[in-house]
Image: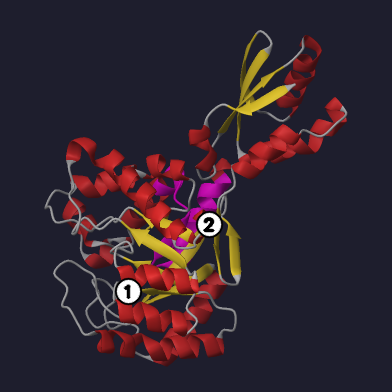
């Protein structure tokens, strides 16, 4: 029997359908149809060709039953399953995010961040918060020492580092094995963070500087590379394809400096724009489906951002529900790593999302 993935586009979508084509003899097709019906798989048939829509869980069950029905295991189906998987990897961690998204908690150590400025000024409070959020499902913790909100106030590299350095030290001391990220576009801060053992660097400028690329080659960290509309041209007619081209080039550049696709997370940059047109934020949210074709993890970073207030005329304290709805939309398109302020609520949203999409067996 000949088996192939009919749509490479679907391979990288979160908890979505893989379109798989089967062709073979009449006897093989008869056996296949019985197996697909037994597994409650949606399919269509045209003569000796069958096209099936398979979620990852369905594909795993099909593989488990294949040898019993056909006498030998299917190497083709196994390859399709392996090719559909998406990983996020770095020093001392590896996450299969194909169907299990990650919660990436934001710890802004700043007095002026748009939502939580000043909240994390006390180290003891932050240690307690991290302990609670680990229990609630957070996998990664990101420290930021400089606000990047619209019209933010620039600070020196020394001040930015002084804000986060004690937290890096104490978090590593109190939580051995913790996965830490630093949100910085400052070359010297990135260098000091990597030297201190931070595993992930989130750069809102997309690793454009020569120095940061040299640091990538030296330390091979995991990275989050963002499209920053404040530094890039945004043209409506071609925006989605421009965004994909930008990330395709960014991934190639980072790979040329020693990273693999699994080390690279891409962030469409919702909320970062020089225009006053909110349509660009919505286009970035809708672009995830297209960006998923790059087969690298995609960050969902919309948590409580100011564009929500501009769209819906709500106060900052009222942005949680719209945040969760936007995050859910981006999950459906292929987002895998949720950068959030509200860990508990995000975990609940993910759980509901997965429950609604898992295959149920009624006995």
Picture residue at 54% right of the left edge, 38% below the top: 11
Give the class, few, some or many, for how many residues have Cα within 10 Å of label 2's Cα (few <14, many ≥20): some
Q: Where's residue 221, x and y in %?
A: 48, 70
Picture residue at 42% right of the left edge, 85% below the top: 126
Give the class, few, some or many, for how many residues have Cα within 10 Å of label 1's Cα (few <14, many ≥20): many
Secondary structure under badge 2? helix
In this view, the residue in front, 262 or 116, is: 262
Q: Quadrant of the C terminus?
A: top right
Q: How is the image coloured?
A: secondary structure
Q: Where's residue 255, x and y in %?
A: 46, 57
204 versus 19 height, above or below: below
Q: CA distance from mark 2 to mark 1?
A: 21 Å
97 versus 77 height, above or below: below
Q: Quadrant of the N terminus?
A: top right
In this view, the residue in front, 241 or 45, is: 241
In the image, is 73 to the left or to the right of 9? right
47 drawn magenta: no
331 drawn magenta: yes
Q: Where's residue 21, x and y in %?
A: 62, 23
Picture residue at 34% right of the left edge, 44% below the top: 244
Q: How many marks?
A: 2
Q: Earlier in the sequence, mark 2 or mark 1?
A: 1
Q: Quadrant of residue 306?
A: bottom left
State whether residue 313 appears in this view: no
Q: Which residue is mark 2?
A: 262
Q: Quadrant of residue 134?
A: bottom right
Q: Where's residue 342, x and y in %?
A: 40, 67
Secondary structure under badge 1? loop
What is the magenta range? 330-355
Q: Which residue is mark 1?
A: 184
In the image, is 35 to the left or to the right of 157? right
């Amino acid at each position: 029997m000949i088996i192939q993935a009919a749509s490479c586009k679907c391979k990288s979508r979160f908890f979505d359908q893989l379109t798989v084509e089967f062709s073979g003899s009449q006897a093989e097709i008869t056996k296949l149809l019985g197996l697909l019906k037994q597994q409650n798989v949606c399919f269509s048939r045209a003569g000796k060709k069958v096209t099936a829509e398979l979620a990852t869980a369905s594909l795993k069950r099909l593989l488990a039953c294949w040898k019993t029905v056909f006498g030998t295991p299917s190497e083709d189906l196994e390859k399709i399953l392996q090719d559909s998987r998406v990983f996020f990897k770095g020093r001392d961690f590896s996450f299969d995010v194909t169907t299990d998204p990650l919660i990436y908690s934001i710890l802004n150590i700043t007095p002026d961040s748009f939502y939580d400025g000043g909240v994390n000024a006390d180290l003891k409070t932050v240690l307690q918060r991290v302990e609670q959020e680990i229990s609630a499902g957070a996998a990664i913790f990101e420290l930021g020492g400089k606000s990047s909100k619209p019209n933010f106030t620039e600070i020196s590299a020394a001040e930015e580092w002084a804000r986060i350095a004690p937290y890096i030290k104490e978090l590593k001391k109190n939580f051995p094995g913790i996965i830490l990220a630093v949100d910085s576009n400052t070359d010297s801060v990135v260098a000091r963070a990597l030297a201190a053992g931070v595993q992930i660097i989130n750069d809102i400028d997309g690793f454009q500087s020569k120095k940061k690329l040299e640091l990538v080659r030296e330390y091979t960290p995991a990275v989050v590379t963002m499209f920053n509309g404040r530094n890039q041209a945004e043209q409506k007619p071609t925006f989605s394809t421009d965004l994909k081209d930008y990330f395709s080039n960014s991934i190639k550049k980072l790979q040329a400096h020693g990273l693999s696709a699994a080390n690279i997370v891409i962030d469409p940059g919702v909320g970062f724009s020089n225009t006053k047109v909110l349509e660009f934020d919505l286009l970035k949210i809708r672009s995830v489906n297209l960006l998923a074709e790059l087969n690298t993890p995609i960050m969902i970073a919309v948590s409580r951002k100011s564009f929500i207030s501009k769209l819906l005329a709500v106060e900052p304290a009222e942005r949680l529900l719209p945040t969760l709805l936007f995050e859910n939309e981006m999950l459906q398109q292929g987002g895998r790593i949720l950068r959030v302020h509200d860990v508990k609520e995000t975990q609940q949203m993910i759980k509901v999302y997965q429950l609604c999409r898992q295959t149920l067996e009624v006995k």
